[in-house]
Image (cartoon, rainbow, N blue to C red):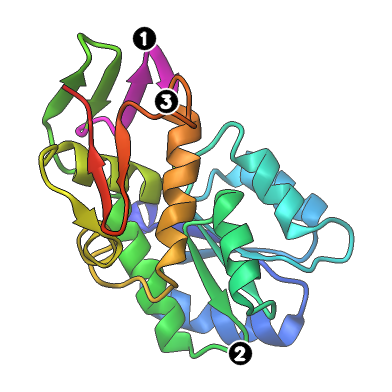
Amino acid sequence: MEESRKKILVVEDEAKIMEFIEPYLLTSGYEVIKACSGKEAEEKLEDEKPDMLLLDLMLPDKSGESILKELRRTSSIPVIILTAKSSEENVIHGLEIGADDYITKPFSPRQMVARVNALFRRSLKEEEEVLVFRKGRLVINQKDYRVQKNGEDVVLTPSEFKLLTTLAKRPTKVFTREELILIAFDGDYAGFDRTIDSHIKNLRSKIELNPKEPDYILTIRGVGYRFGGD
């Protein structure tokens, strides 16, 4: 049924790229909403309530970075950046400001659809278990995709939520960065190992009392990370 189709907002000012993207998403069963400027993107985000955002960084009126930063103040909608900025530093920056994935131009349409499908899989709210740590100071409700810190809701991106639950469900295990990519991202994430560090940094800033001296997500030097809640 039409109403059950996932809605994807594609923000891209180059008509040829939009024409290239849209048919593949439609064929894959998604509804496509289009915006060619930052202003139009913000209006569509408010009016259409899309399920995912594909965001170009270089827009004529407003940068994609500023749109993403503002969006992350209130929303955990999955976001994939589409850009010609392909350096590792640009990828890291995009993830640090809240992107879940990063596709550099030029890209294949099949790769784009695979990334979209993978991110939606990571965003599913299938599990019902509620995890409680530190006498209720941190609560992870997997069914409702909800995290509370000291009784207040914390807005996490799908990738941050998946990382947190992966670590929290096995608190005695030390995960390498490679393991977190394979487990938390279903092996579909093709970024750099350092991108995990960026996600961890963002996650700590949201759930830790003091991100520089974390209680929950502990760094095991030379290996990776483990969960420290009890």
- The amino acid on which the numbered mark 2 sits, given as a three-letter code, is Pro
Query: Are the two marked residues, 1 and 3, in contact with CB atoms closer than 8 angstroms?
Result: no
Q: Which of marks 2 and 3 is nearer the N terminus?
A: 2
Q: Position of residue 47 (x, y in %)?
A: 64, 41
Q: Splitting the image into 4 quarters, where does residue 139 fall? A: top left
Q: Residue at x 48, y 30 (%)?
A: 211
How many other residues sit within 10 Å of disc 1, few (<14), some (14-19) or many (≥20)? few
Q: Residue at x 88, y 66 (%)?
A: 60
Residue tagged 2:
106
Q: Where is residue 34 in the image (x, y as percent from the top left)?
A: 65, 64
The residue positioned farthest toward the front in the image shown: 221
Check disc 2 and report its element: helix, strand or loop. Answer: loop
How far separated are the C-alphas under marks 1 and 3?
13 Å
Residue tagged 3:
208
Relative to 143, 110 lies left or right: right
How far separated are the C-alphas under marks 2 and 1?
45 Å
Q: Which residue is drawn at 21% across and 26% down?
A: 229
Residue tagged 1:
151
- The magenta segment is 142-156
Query: Quarter holding the C terminus?
Result: top left
- The amino acid on which the numbered mark 1 sits, given as a three-letter code, is Gly
Q: Earlier in the sequence, mark 2 or mark 1?
A: 2
Residue 40 visible within the image: yes
Query: Quarter holding the N terminus?
Result: bottom left
